[in-house]
Amino acid sequence: MRKRVFSGVQPTGNIHIGNYLGALRQFVQLQDENDCIYCIVDLHAITTPKDPRELREHILNVAALYMAVGIDPAKSTVFVQSDVPGHAELSWILMCNSYTGELSRMTQFKDKSRASESAGTGLFAYPVLMAADILLYDSDIVPVGNDQKQHIELTRDIAIRVNNKYGEDTFVVPEGRFLKEGARIMALDDPSAKMSKSAENELSRISLLDDEAKIKKAIMRATTDSDGEIRFDPENKPGVSNLLTIYGVFTGTSVAELEKNYAGQGYGALKKDLVEVTIESLRPIREKYAEICASGELPRILADGAEQAGAKAEQVIRRVKERFGLGSR
Ligand code: AMP
Ligand code: TRP
């Protein structure tokens, strides 16, 4: 049976190989057998201040990268979150059904707010907007990286809570989908932190559109350790293990096989090969990206996507309003 799949990426910077290996790769795998909706979550992006011109650029950039990695708008719905008003609407209704206590426990909020009095209310409510995104489409499956586990759990808790109060079929209770390998790619300069779009050091990440010189520099300078042995051991050798994971996922080789192939060789050899592997893996994405930008089709694809998504969202909003007794009709 075809399932409803929903996921989103924030337009906050250039998509990196962590986003790709943990999330976008799944988006593409799922689209043949399921009814997929992929969103560019711009309302999430403004939980911290954004320059309007840069935000618009990033929205279009994420949309083009969705297509460049292989999302096909003829199979999947691709749209921008704020083009469909139901996200903000449902978000308010869910906020009235979530607790400040549970939101205070979200690690992403704790990390980003650092307990500051002036942390934005939007940052606090961020996971509720994410729950609204998912529940607005009766989603069954949500493909994401490991860092979103807590938010998916919260979404399920809210859905179950509302269903208990307003009727079992108010919301579909969704499930997260996490990959075994690649669900958490670490920063190249500091393998104790996840690779992120916003880290200050450009060499901490490889973005999908990075040129060859940048890819080479970031990998050759990646932090490893001093024992010199190529072994997969994320606890004691996080840097080398991260490189092996990236290599393994890009080439479809098991980490055990890589360990065998590189037995007795130094980190330099592994890094040099990984530079080649990464360049070759990203080349088709870069080429497709240029094609899509040149085609001028993006605005039409996003307008069609918003229309399709909007029609689906409206049905759920109508159902929820009716269950809650909202409105005059
Ligand atoms: P974001 O950039 O926060 O909008 O994330 C978009 C998607 O990429 C989400 O599904 C994240 O879980 C996933 N993701 C972000 N960073 C990483 C990472 N370092 N490793 C694996 N997946 C990631
Ligand atoms: N919070 C997600 C992230 O930072 C992005 C996101 C927003 C999302 N809404 C979503 C992911 C709905 C999946 C489903 O990566």
Image (cartoon, helix red, strand yellow):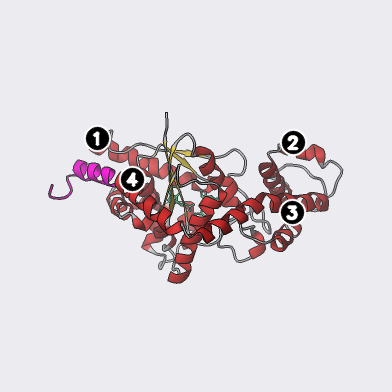
Mark 3 lies on residue: 275
Q: Quick check: 181 left or right of 32?
A: right
Tag nearer the camera, 3 or 1: 3
Q: Which mark is drawn over residue 136?
A: 4
Q: Which mark is drawn over residue 177?
A: none
| Amino acid bearing label 1 | Gly
Tag nearer the camera, 3 or 2: 3
What is the spatial separation of the Cα atoms under label 4 and label 2, in whole angstroms?
42 Å
What is the spatial separation of the Cα atoms under label 1 and label 4, in whole angstroms?
16 Å
User: The N terminus appears in which quarter of the rendering?
Assistant: top left
Q: Quick check: 163 left or right of 25?
A: left
SS for callout 4: loop
Sequence-wise first label, 3 or 2: 2
Q: Residues within 10 Å of mark 4 (few under 14, many from 20)?
A: many
Say which of 118 and 39 sits in front.
39
Residue 228's x, y, as percent? 83, 49
Mark 1 lies on residue: 167
Residue 260 picture quarter:
top right
| Amino acid bearing label 3 | Val
Q: Which mark is drawn over residue 256?
A: 2
Q: Which residue range is magenta in the image?
A: 313-329
Q: How many marks?
A: 4
| Amino acid bearing label 4 | Leu
Q: Residues within 10 Å of mark 2 (few under 14, many from 20)?
A: few
What is the spatial separation of the Cα atoms under label 3 and label 4, in whole angstroms?
41 Å
Q: Is residue 114 visible?
A: no
Residue farthest along the left direction in this orientation: 328
SS for callout 3: helix
Q: Quick check: 326 left or right of 101?
A: left
